[in-house]
Image (tube, rainbow, N blue to C red):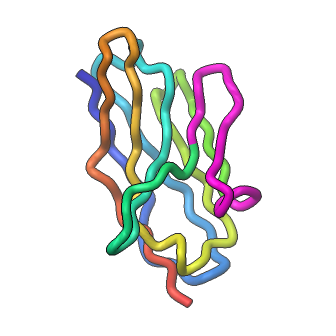
C-alpha cells in the first residue's frame, strides 16, 4: 500500500503563487509515475501534470509555462509549483501515484486551491 498526503493549498489572489506538496509513504519503492490532477466544481477530474521517474514532465495546455511539477525521490515527495494563478485554476488538487509492478494506482484525499479575482 501507498499513502499520499497533499499539503500547501489555500486561498490566494489572481497572480499569486502556491506550491503543493504530496508526501508518499508505505511501499513507495513500487512508484513509477506520479501526477497531479484537479477537479473544479461541476467539472470532471483532469490531469494537470505528470512525471515519470527519470523522465520529462508533461502538462495540460492551460498550465504550461505557469506550473512546474517535480519530485524528490529521496524524500518521497511530489511538488507542484503554481505561478501566475488564475481564478480558473480553482479546484481540488489530487496527487496520484502509479505502481505498475502491483497494478495499483493510488490517490490522495485532495487539497483545495481557491484563486480569487
Report the side of 91 relative to 16 (left or right): left
Q: At which x and y percent is residue 94?
A: 38, 50
Report the side of 71 relative to 113 (left or right): right
Nearer to the camera, 22 or 31: 31
Report the side of 26 relative to 56 (left or right): left
The residue located at (31%, 33%) in the rendering is: 106
Does 58 appear in magenta?
Answer: yes
Q: At which x and y percent is residue 5?
A: 32, 43
Q: Quadrant of residue 29?
A: top left
- Relative height, residue 55 to residue 38 (above, below): above
Q: At which x and y percent is residue 65?
A: 76, 58
Q: At which x and y percent is residue 104?
A: 30, 22
Nearer to the camera, 90 or 15: 90
The residue located at (28%, 26%) in the rendering is: 2
- Relative height, residue 95 to residue 110 (above, below): above
Quarter of the image that includes the N terminus: top left
* Tally of marks: 0
Q: Quadrant of residue 19?
A: bottom right
Does 25 appear in magenta?
Answer: no
The residue located at (37%, 68%) in the rendering is: 43
- Magenta span covers which residues? 50-66
The residue located at (37%, 31%) in the rendering is: 24
Amino acid at each position: 500500500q501507498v499513502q499520499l498526503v497533499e499539503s500547501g493549498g489555500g486561498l490566494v489572489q489572481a497572480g499569486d503563487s502556491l506550491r503543493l506538496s504530496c508526501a508518499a509513504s508505505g511501499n513507495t519503492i513500487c512508484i513509477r509515475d506520479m501526477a497531479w490532477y484537479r477537479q473544479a466544481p461541476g467539472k470532471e477530474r483532469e490531469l494537470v501534470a505528470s512525471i515519470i521517474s527519470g523522465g520529462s514532465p508533461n502538462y495540460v495546455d492551460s498550465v504550461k509555462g505557469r506550473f512546474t511539477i517535480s519530485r524528490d525521490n529521496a524524500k518521497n515527495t511530489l511538488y507542484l509549483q503554481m505561478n501566475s494563478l488564475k481564478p480558473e485554476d480553482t479546484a481540488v488538487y489530487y496527487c496520484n501515484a502509479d505502481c505498475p509492478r502491483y497494478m495499483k494506482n493510488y490517490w490522495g484525499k485532495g487539497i483545495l486551491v481557491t484563486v480569487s479575482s
